[in-house]
Image (spheres, helix red, strand yellow):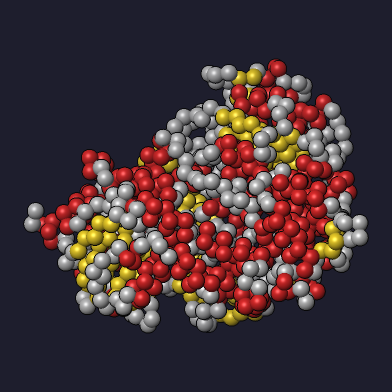
Amino acid sequence: MTLDEGRQSFGLAVPSPGPILAAMELPEPFAGWFASRGWSLHRHQQTLLQDETRCRLLVAPTGAGKTLAGFLPSLVDLSQHPRDGLHTLYVSPLKALATDIRRNLGTPVEEMGLAIRVEDRTGDTSQAVKRRQRTDPPHLLLTTPESLALLLSQPESHRVFAGLARVVVDEVHALAGSKRGDQLSLGLGRLRALAPEMRMVALSATVDDPQEIADWLAPGECLVHHADPGPDPDIGVLETRGEPPWAGQGGRYAAAEVMEEIARYRTTIVFINTRAQAELFFRELWRANTDTLPIALHHGSLAREARQRVEAAMASGDLRAVVATGSLDLGLDWGDVDLVIQIGAPKNVKRLVQRIGRANHTYEAPSRALIVPANRFEVLECQAALDAVRERDLDGGPLPAGGLDVLCQHLNLTACAGDFDGDALFDEIRGSGAYRDLSRADYDRCLDFCATGGYALRAYPQWHRLLRRPDGRWGLRDPRAATRLRMNVGTIVEPEYVKVRMGRGRGGPILGEVEEAFAATLSPGDSFLIGGQVVKYNQTREMVLQVQPAPGREPKIAVFSGTKLAMSTELAHRVIGWLQEPDRWSVLPAPVRDWLELQERFSQMPRPDRLLVESFPVGDRFHTTIHTFAGRNANQTLGLLISQRMEEAELAPQGFVCSDYGVMLWGLRDVPDPEPLLAADGLKGAFEDWLAGNTVMKRTFRQVAVVAGLVERNLPGKRKTGRQQTVSSEVIYDTLRRFDPDHLLLQITRTEALRGLVDFGRIEEMLRRSAGRIDHVRADRVTPLAAPLMLEAGRIPLRGGSAEDAVLADEEALLNAYLPELATG
């Protein structure tokens, strides 16, 4: 392994200024192996090597050698004290990352002649290997939260984990606060019970509140160690010849300039926020690739083989660029990535920092990155994100309490491993960071659900999973249920997909997959975009779409599960700050400066402590724009609520449209006073009443029911289609609403819906911030700040109103409403 390969694999460093541990102080054979390469350790790697604390969170920038810091103590211990059985468990959010770490560890283990077995265990591991690992585990096992949950559900888990010495949790920020993180937190609690002497280290580059993450890992026990943050990144906004558009998310106007940047560097990663946008931008980038440089596309809906080919080509230096979504946010550490380009605003600072770290994956070199705003508002958002990065101010918020649906799954899986004492397990779960505030009442409700299904479902034995035995311990009512429970492990509930195959037979290559809902809209002859190429749909055979190439045709855009990301609260506040500081506008592109100056001239700017509402006519419709800066999900919710209040006030609402920055509503009557529409009193109650029977609630219930085990995705020998799962969950949902409205899963669903899909908390934050102080501007034309919403996709008509009649589709006609003012002074 060369010096460069070693550095990109482990973050090892040649001697450099600052306190380091000399290679000679390492025990043999490590000292000789390091010395022969001229390598030494950074201070944080030395700290973890000598660390004897029960739990440690290492916060270090990408490229600082977190992986080595996590594994070196295990390698040294095993070399000095050989033993059989599992010594170290490594948990990663990504299967690919576990596989990559195994490959990287293999070289030093082999070259130093260490008698250490390193294996991974993920969804891609064969059943034969999984069976063997349960009886003959390796010394170092690399896995994911889901596979850990499966291992802990096995009767052999007590023996497999009894001698566990260390746990390494990688990219912990990507797990904490999510349902996958809840599952991992419960798993760590189980491991502490099985191996009381184990030590744990967690690794992350992007943590906004390290102590909160430390308490999530091990309440009251985990210490935080900050590595030297390294040099500041070299990051800026890409200058483009074309003007940023008024609306849209794709950034395709800048494809030519992005291609020019790619041509200047050896290897570039181009990040974009969603899979559909990645497909579209890659297509536009290929059109601008007049020199036919080797570039590729990578996202989660492409075939695994296709993704692996791209990863291998990047690792070998055969690609000049890859366009990627979050599939590479935590991805493989390619040391020779010279540049990262973010297309569109990153929507939160932590995501931007994580992506920047993919470039120049070495500790001493600054990461080089460029941001391409997708539209004019995003120019401001990108500037705000740059400010936050320079100030090392990561956005975030309090971690939510662990989900009770995940707890129900954990109780069932724990019973699969053997009977348990309910009181002892409650104490164990309360020792898990995500569940440290769990009440006994909620725990008992989860136990009751697992045993009976709840009041309305007691008569149906298929939901009676647990049974309390005469000795007071809990176990599976029917041991045969263990197979089905294990088949449905996990917390990721995505729409069902169908595969896309090239050719009419069974032997063609799989290109990837699209959602069932999109596949249902296709007729033979329709074309769509997947994997960067246009294909024509021929037929569906055995739930596989058969397609053929269709170059040159205008395609539909395949639906993927990635949702539009909402701007964080912290970034929103920074954007409002930019609007309040005209002295800073000189760094903005001239069209954006002109736009903001027009807003000041014809209306006014939003203020941090007030809410700006603008009203104006367009044709025979009256428009009202509320500049909330509350994020897309919250604004969509607000649009529904305000529409409902407009209906009650007989203002004849016709529809609304929203973005991250505001919501625009239109109707047949003018809004004389927006204050009653925005009154906080009764808003949440009205929303919950509306939400109860809405499809948002039903969709959320399906996710909760799948995680909790009420609705099964997989059965022995077959898998339910997405339609079957949806029908099952909707029937149960309607039954529970009618006969058991306080059912545990309905309460979980309400909490999930308010917090996640509809983001009601952001609405409450916006109303608290403005405290009823509203600036209502009445204009005779579209205001400049409202103009982007006129052109935003996703307009929602109400009660048969025509959204197309309500907005001007022609951008030039819209802008002519006020742009002539520029020409006259």
Is residue 136 depicted above or below 459 in this figure?
Answer: above
Quadrant location, the N terminus: top right
Residue sitting at 61 percent across and 27 percent down? 44
Determine whether, in the image, residue 571 is placed left or right of residue 593. right
Residue sitting at 84 percent across and 64 percent down? 467
Q: Position of residue 495 (x, y in %)?
A: 59, 68
Q: Position of residue 659 (x, y in %)?
A: 37, 61
Q: Position of residue 280 (x, y in %)?
A: 44, 62
As rendered, which of 479 and 763 lies closer to the eye? 763
Q: Position of residue 353 (x, y in %)?
A: 48, 41
Q: How many marks?
A: 0
- Please tell me in which quadrant of the rendered image residue 47 appears: top right
Is residue 450 at least partly visible in the picture? yes
Is residue 612 depicted above or below 166 in this figure?
Answer: below
Residue sitting at 76 percent across and 50 percent down? 426
Determine whether, in the image, residue 148 is placed left or right of residue 346. right
Residue sitting at 50 percent across and 71 percent down? 689
Which residue is outermost to the left?
A: 824
Is residue 123 at least partly visible in the picture? no
As rendered, which of 546 and 496 lies closer to the eye? 496
Is residue 170 depicted above or below 40 in this figure?
Answer: below
- Please tell me in which quadrant of the rendered image residue 286 appears: bottom left
Determine whether, in the image, residue 304 is placed left or right of residue 575. right
Is residue 640 depicted above or below 132 in this figure?
Answer: below
